[in-house]
Image: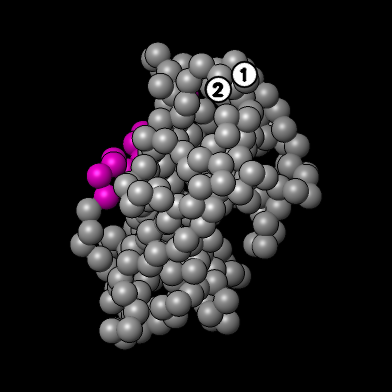
Amino acid sequence: MDERKSLIGEYNFVAEPFCSDFTGHMSLSTLGNMLLNVAEFHASDRGFGIITINQGAHTWVLSRLAMEFDEMPRQTEPFTIQTWVENVYKLFTARNFAIVNKDNTPIGYARSVWAMIDLESRKPVDLLSVYSGGISEYVCDRDCPIDGPGKVKVVSTEPVREVSMLFSDIDINGHVNSIRYIDHILDLFPLDLYKEKRIKRFEIAYVNESYYGDTLAFYLDEKGEGEFHIEVKKKDSGEVICRSKVIFI
């Protein structure tokens, strides 16, 4: 391993006003997008970013993401995102994050699971052998004090919303952007709920891809006070696209 590259990457940001919601804090989807960018920065600096692996006809896809916060970054305030690789398995790698405020206090953490896929077959690649197994050199034993994504079960049979996927939903890989699902899920809840409570934890597990022109149906169950489970399906086929858990406090 190149000793000049630390196992933990640190990236500094400011919570810009245009990235904040009506509460004066950074929006969850914007922060989620920053986590994905930071993952790419860290991977790219160490030789396994998207541009590099695209040359080998591979790309990264996000499989699961769990975020938990004591508070969100406040508008105009600086903060830092730290990231590190927790483990590398044959078909998946686990990457964690810490969100640290201007006083150097952690205010949130995130856990994510990624797969590297072949661009043509769309099937997972063996991470323990590809690129000479070099990704494993950056595994770090730093603790991440939140649970990983759990099980989500939705029994509702009537959707609470249907949304057609349009231009702004599509990412560089030609399918619906991972973070756009977060926006659409958060839109299921009324503004008054966000005035009274905040999101403590958000989880999402991606099952299948969706594309431009797909109409997605959103199903929602309330599991307890402040806890909601969501399942997103293609309207026409019923194919499950993703599942999510949102906990308000």
Q: Is residue 129 visible?
A: no
Question: At 72% across and 33% down in the image, what residue appears?
Answer: 163
Whole-percent x and y of residue 65? 43, 46
Q: Residues within 10 Å of mark 2 (few under 14, many from 20)?
A: some
Could you say which is closer to the camera, residue 124 or residue 45? 45
Which is the main secondary structure of the residues drawn in magenta? loop
Could you say which is closer to the camera, residue 30 or residue 131? 30
What stretch of residues is rendered in magenta? 144-155
Question: What amino acid type is highlighted by mark number 1?
Answer: Pro
Q: Would residue 147 be counted in the magenta stretch?
A: yes
Residue under pointer 2? 194
Question: What amino acid type is highlighted by mark number 2?
Answer: Tyr
Residue under pointer 1? 190
Question: At 51% across and 57% down in the image, what residue appears?
Answer: 13
Whole-percent x and y of residue 197? 48, 20
Question: At 38% across and 59% down in the image, what residue appears?
Answer: 82
Whole-percent x and y of residue 147? 29, 40
Q: Quadrant of the N terminus?
A: bottom left
Q: For the residues carrying marks 2 and 1, which lies nearer the camera in this image?
A: 2
Callout 2: SS: helix
- 226 displayed left or right of 162: left
Q: Would residue 122 be counted in the magenta stretch?
A: no
Question: At 56% across and 19% down in the image, what residue appears?
Answer: 195
Callout 1: SS: loop
Residue 140 vertical placement versus 69 (above, below): below
Whole-percent x and y of residue 112? 40, 52
Q: Residues within 10 Å of mark 1 (few under 14, many from 20)?
A: few
Report if the CB atoms under discs 2 and 1 are less than 8 Å apart: yes
Q: Quadrant of the C terminus?
A: top left
Residue 70 vertical placement versus 138 (above, below): above
Q: Is residue 161 visible?
A: yes
